[in-house]
Amino acid sequence: SMAFSQSDMLQREVYLFERLDSGRSNERMKNLKCIVFIRPTKQNIQLLADELRSPKYGAYFICK
């Protein structure tokens, strides 16, 4: 398991943090890659499935 602070992530050129349950904006950002850190609960899997059904980002990397 890895843990990074937001400042650590910014130093690694990660620019956007967003929760799957935060309400989706319609803005598409196909030029960005998405790294998903997720606990494999039924609700989280459903949120992720909803996201992938209408993807906002160009690529997804899923970590549990």
Image (spheres, rainbow, N blue to C red):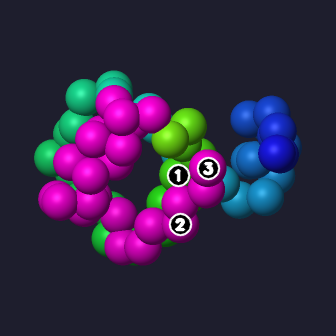
Query: Viewed as shown, does residue 17 lie left or right of 20?
Result: right
Give the mark, 1 or 2, whose residue is nearer the N terminus. 1
The three-letter amino acid code for the residue at tag 1 is: Val
Q: Is the Cβ of the residue at disc 1 closer than 8 Å to that at disc 2? A: yes
Q: Nearer the viewer, mark 3 or mark 2?
A: 3
Picture layout, residue 17 above or below residue 48: above
Work out whether residue 13 or residue 51 is closer to the camera in this orientation and state it.
51
The three-letter amino acid code for the residue at tag 2 is: Phe
Query: Viewed as shown, does residue 27 lie left or right of 17?
Result: left
- The stretch of residues the image draws in magenta is 41-64
Picture layout, residue 14 above or below residue 3: below
Residue 39 x %, y %: 55, 37
Picture layout, residue 38 above or below residue 34: above
Q: Residue at x 34, y 30 (%)?
A: 43
Asked whether residue 17 appears in the rendered view, the answer is no
- The residue singled out by tag 2 in the image is 61
The three-letter amino acid code for the residue at tag 3 is: Lys
Residue 53 x %, y %: 17, 60
Picture layout, residue 31 above or below residue 20: below
Tell me how far mark 3 sits from mark 2, CA to CA.
Answer: 10 Å
Q: Specify whether residue 56 is painted magenta.
A: yes
Q: Specify whether residue 27 is painted magenta.
A: no
Which of the 4 image quadrants contains residue 1?
Answer: top right
- The residue singled out by tag 3 in the image is 64
Task: Check residue 36 in the rendering and tell me which mark sits there, or answer none.
Answer: 1
Tell me how far mark 1 sits from mark 3, CA to CA.
Answer: 8 Å
